[in-house]
Image (cartoon, rainbow, N blue to C red):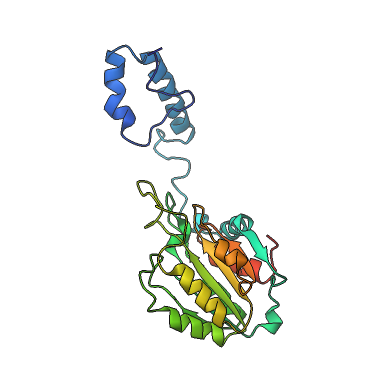
Amino acid sequence: ALTDLLIPPGLDLDCGSYYPKFGKSTVLKGRTRESIIDKSLMNLYVVLMRLGFFDGNPLYNSLGMADVCSNEHIELAREAAREGIVLLKNNNTLPLISSKIRSLAVVGPHANATTVMIGNYAGIPCGYSSPLDALSRYGKVRYATGCADVICRNESLIFPAMMAAKHSDATLIFAGLDLTVEAESLDRIDLLLPGYQTQMINQVAEEAKGPVILVILSAGGVDITFAKDNPKISAILWAGYPGEQGGSAIADVVFGHYNP
């Protein structure tokens, strides 16, 4: 029952400290056979050989930024972001008709999101398309953060967001979480939006002249029942952490270039 405890079936690589820390002792104690380790090493080195790792010229070594950041690849990032967006509520509001919307309020702690959109375990992005940048292509934008960050410790920045919504044809509120709230080694104590975010959303929606769309950026679940039940919030989108082209993808959905 104690044989081969170290390496679970199908797992050849440990991206951490477990194997180096316990590998030798489990072999010396007879709990793991060297043949099992040899098999895992064989699998790993075969992949390295296929990549040309030992030939002095690895297969992908010559690829640079121009190869990675081609128009085709940037469009693929945008496509992936579009396909990841989920429509949670729509009271005959989306898509917005661009010819009827001359001004937009773009508010909330994620309204100008960049690095937060790639989450963690991410490579180096080619560039960012933030919600603010992407939506600015559709009309005059009034931008206000509403909260200093997702923790939203006080209500001092809510009023400018309310005024932006009051004087715009449509309002988009970008709220949610980030890696300061949800990540490995971080436990959340509830499923609510942090701090004063809920208050900010409700007050902005109440003051808004036109339709209000709430966009949530998060990985973990968030209880937004209050927004579902608020008749002033016409539509809700969940965008996850949509990657470097997240802003463009959200704008594509909001203005009907993609149906979620």
For the question of whether residue 110 can be seen, the reply is no
The reply, left or right, for residue 146 in relation to residue 23 is: right
For the question of whether residue 63 can be seen, the reply is yes
The reply, left or right, for residue 3 in relation to residue 257 is: left
The residue depicted at 28 percent of the width and 13 percent of the height is 29
The residue depicted at 63 percent of the width and 85 percent of the height is 102
Where is residue 79 drawn, in percent x and y?
62, 58
Q: Give the quarter of the image for residue 153.
A: bottom left
Quadrant for the C terminus, please: bottom right
Observer-nearest residue: 170 or 195? 195
Observer-nearest residue: 47 or 180? 180
Where is residue 207 drawn, in percent x and y?
55, 82
The reply, left or right, for residue 172 in relation to residue 33 is: right
The residue depicted at 38 percent of the width and 65 percent of the height is 151
Residue 194 lies, with reference to residue 157, above or below; the image says above
The residue depicted at 56 percent of the width and 60 percent of the height is 239
Quadrant for the N terminus, please: top left
Q: Residue furthest right?
A: 92
Q: Give the quarter of the image for residue 253.
A: bottom right
Q: Residue furthest bottom?
A: 167
Where is residue 22 drawn, in percent x and y?
29, 25
The reply, left or right, for residue 19 in relation to residue 96 is: left
Where is residue 192 drawn, in percent x and y?
47, 59
Observer-nearest residue: 252 or 227? 227
Residue 53 lies, with reference to residue 93, above or below; the image says above
| Count of numbered tags | 0
